[in-house]
Amino acid sequence: AAGVIQSPRHLIKEKRETATLKCYPIPRHDTVYWYQQGPGQDPQFLISFYEKMQSDKGSIPDRFSAQQFSDYHSELNMSSLELGDSALYFCASQLAEQETQYFGPGTRLLVL
Amino acid sequence: AQSVTQLDSHVSVSEGTPVLLRCNYSSSYSPSLFWYVQHPNKGLQLLLKYTSAATLVKGINGFEAEFKKSETSFHLTKPSAHMSDAAEYFCVVSPPGGTSYGKLTFGQGTILTVHP
């Protein structure tokens, strides 16, 4: 079965640079969630989209923005990167009427 | 508001012995509860979920969990541990229903170590 695809899998950036993370949900899934997992921490919800509209917002810095496109893929844009942004970023997709989120493998971002 | 507390940050068992990973939740409504597993450098895999149906939930790889409303608990168990079970386990709570507001709240995680 098709799973959630995230790209890139690994990313190294310098401070103050920008990064774009992409998420391709499971086909027919209309909802996408982004989570950030810092070293040794549990995943923290950042933001979610349903039918291309932002549906909820968590602890996402103002330097980050995200959107969901017409094909339901989502992109997380991160600007003015800081050392503390180094983390594993997960995307999860869901069919809204179901109750299960399926996670991608994550993008590991390292900011130097 | 909702929160999850995993009572043990580390659990160590011998192969072939039972596994118990403890989770308590707090929620102002009847939540949906999940257990996810994360192997090193891997993504999160769903083990099982409770969504107000049967209180004893069976998942993959022989795991099961029992929802106890009176104790606000959702402990994960497995009768016999296998070496491949070594991973980090997250107890997760979500608002009920398949809405677009299913923001997951994770517990702090329990690292399971399995000794030969």
Image (spheres, coloured by chain):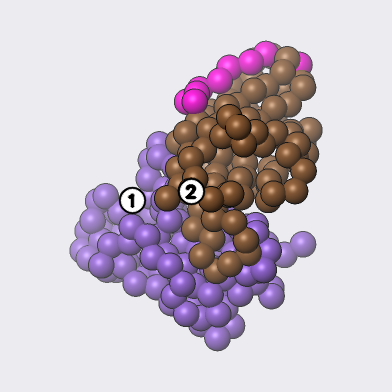
Q: Spot the residue most to the bottom.
A: A70
Residue displayed at 65% across by 57% down: A100
Mark 2 packing: few (<14 Cα in 10 Å), some, or many (20+)? few
Regarding residue A26, the answer to whether it shows in the image is no
Compared across the picture, whether B72 is left or right of A21 comes to right
Label 2, on which residue? Answer: B28
Q: Tell me the colour chain B is drawn in.
A: brown
Residue placed at 51% from the left, 65% from the top?
B101
- Residue A49, image x, y percentages: 49, 72
Q: Kindly identify which chain the residue marked by label 2 belongs to.
A: B
Q: Tell me how far mark 1 sits from mark 2, CA to CA.
A: 34 Å
Nearer the observer, A18 or B61: B61
Give the image quarter of residue B116.
Answer: top right
| Chain that is purple in the image | A
| Residue A31 point in image, percent of width and height | 57, 70
Q: Name the residue under label 1.
A: A86
In the displayed structure, B19 sits above or below A38; it is above
Where residue B8 sits in the image (x, y, percent)? 50, 23
Q: Where is residue A24 in the image (x, y as percent from the top left)?
A: 58, 70
Q: In this view, does B2 lie above or below A58?
A: above
The structure residue drawn at horizontal position 69% and vertical position 75%, both measured from the top left corner, is A28
Please tell me which residue lies in front, A105 or B24: B24
B71, A26: nearer the viewer? B71
Q: Does the magenta stretch include residue B12?
A: yes
Instruction: Look at label 2 and name its amino acid.
Output: Ser
Q: Which of marks 1 and 2 is in front?
A: 2
Q: Can residue B84 be seen in this view?
A: yes
The magenta stretch is: B7-16
The answer to whether marks 1 and 2 mark residues whose Cβ atoms lie closer than 8 Å is no
